[in-house]
Image (cartoon, rainbow, N blue to C red):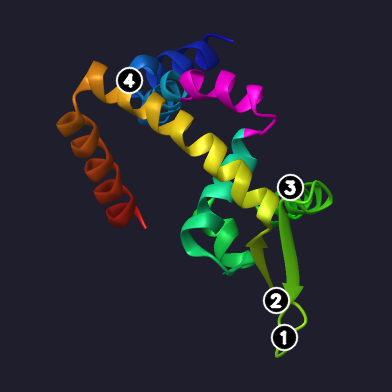
Amino acid sequence: MSDIKSNDESLAKELRAFEDALPIALLRAREAVMIRFRPMLAKNGVTEQQWRVLRAIQENKNVDATKLSEWCCLLMPSLSRILRTMESDGLITRTRATDDARRQSVELTADGKALFEKIAPQSEAIYAEIEQALTKDRVSEMVDGLRTMMSLLK
């Protein structure tokens, strides 16, 4: 038993402090940001994931579901469920590609566009509050730093 305890103590000394772990810091930073958006999204009847999908489709128009999955950081099974719900709510349409029945493209309907137009100003107001607290330059630097980290860790 003392050997196990000794090994555990040795590993603990080698492991960085929990508070200094990058994954935890990223999760906490995400939560500090998202806690500001969740009430607005809930008020508009939209989940975080649905809002990401709406934003990505609005910005990229007729988009392939596989690309949408990558852009929105959603696994395909989750995205499929989200798209099914959004389609039944009349927010999007899905069409199969003529050259490959496995591929489908996704577009916003008029209702989806209207919902986006309703939520976008509210979202931007929250961004403005965040930029006021952190400064616009600092937010830009953080986003640039995260992009650099992602490209280097691929």
Q: Residue at x 72, y 86 (%)?
A: 100
Q: Is residue 116 visible?
A: yes
Tell whether label 1 touches label 2 (CB within 8 Å).
yes
Q: In x, y percent, where is residue 45?
A: 70, 29
> Label 1 vs label 3: CA separation?
22 Å
Taking the image as shown, residue 129 lies to the left or right of residue 104, namely left
Which tag, 1 or 3, sits closer to the chain's start?
3
Report, in whole angstroms, how far the alpha carbon at label 1 lies from the one at label 4.
45 Å
Distance from label 3 to label 4 (Cα)? 29 Å
Q: Which residues are magenta?
A: 34-47
Name which residue lies at 53% across and 9% down. 2
In this view, the mark in front (2 or 4): 4
What residue sits right under mark 4 in the picture? 129
Outermost bottom residue: 99
**Front position in the image: 134 or 151:** 134
Q: Amino acid at mark 1?
A: Asp
> Is residue 40 covered in magenta?
yes
Disc 2: which residue: 103
Q: Earlier in the sequence, mark 2 or mark 3?
A: 3
